[in-house]
Amino acid sequence: MKLKPLADRVVVKMVEAEETTKSGIILTASAKEKPQIAEIVAVGPGGIVEGKEVKMYVNVGDKVITSKYSGTEVKLDGEEYTIVRQSDILAICE
């Protein structure tokens, strides 16, 4: 199955967080913060959203930083994805 976002939404897959600190301490799952860096796997077409025209500025494959607790998490075919609005993306990592 494939996810196809609508309007100004973007499907992202979170990049795994570091499991050790710089000093070599291994972190447990409960000590890890939710990752904010994600890779875009699908982009909606944009268009008119709430009466305003929205142009999409991100592309599939871009690495982005998202708002910490934004979006809707979904699990599909054993993979976890998050669907966010383009406005929840804070920056593109280059």
Image (tube, grey):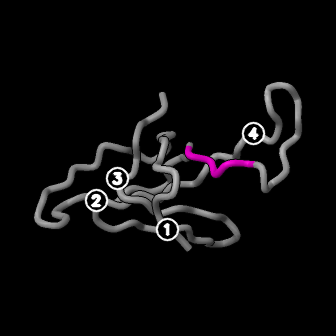
Rate crowding at label 3 as few (under 14), some (14 to 19) or many (20 or more) other CA atoms within 10 Å: many
Q: CA distance from mark 1 to mark 4?
A: 23 Å
Q: Are marks 1 and 4 in contact (CB under 8 Å)?
A: no
Q: Which residue is mark 3?
A: 86
The nearer-to-camera label among 3 and 2 is 3
Q: Quadrant of the N terminus?
A: bottom right
Q: Are marks 1 and 3 in contact (CB under 8 Å)?
A: no
Q: Amino acid at mark 2?
A: Pro
16 horizontally vs 8: left or right: right
Q: Which residue is mark 1?
A: 72
Q: Earlier in the sequence, mark 3 or mark 2?
A: 2
Q: CA distance from mark 2 to mark 4?
A: 33 Å
Q: Which residue is mark 2?
A: 45
Rate crowding at label 1 as few (under 14), some (14 to 19) or many (20 or more) other CA atoms within 10 Å: few
For label 1, the SS is strand
Label ID, residue 19? none
Q: Find out whether residue 35 is within the magenta segment.
A: yes
Q: Which residue is mark 4?
A: 18
Q: CA distance from mark 1 to mark 2?
A: 19 Å
Q: Are marks 4 and 3 in contact (CB under 8 Å)?
A: no
Closer to the camera, 23 or 37? Answer: 23
Q: CA distance from mark 3 to mark 2?
A: 11 Å
Q: Give me the residue at 41% from left, 37% from top.
A: 91
| Residue 79 percent across, percent down from the top left | 66, 65
| Residue 23 percent across, percent down from the top left | 85, 25
Q: CA distance from mark 4 to mark 3?
A: 26 Å
Q: Which residues are magenta?
A: 32-36
Q: CA distance from mark 1 to mark 3?
A: 13 Å
Q: Give me the residue at 40% from left, 42% from top.
A: 90
Q: Amino acid at mark 3?
A: Gln
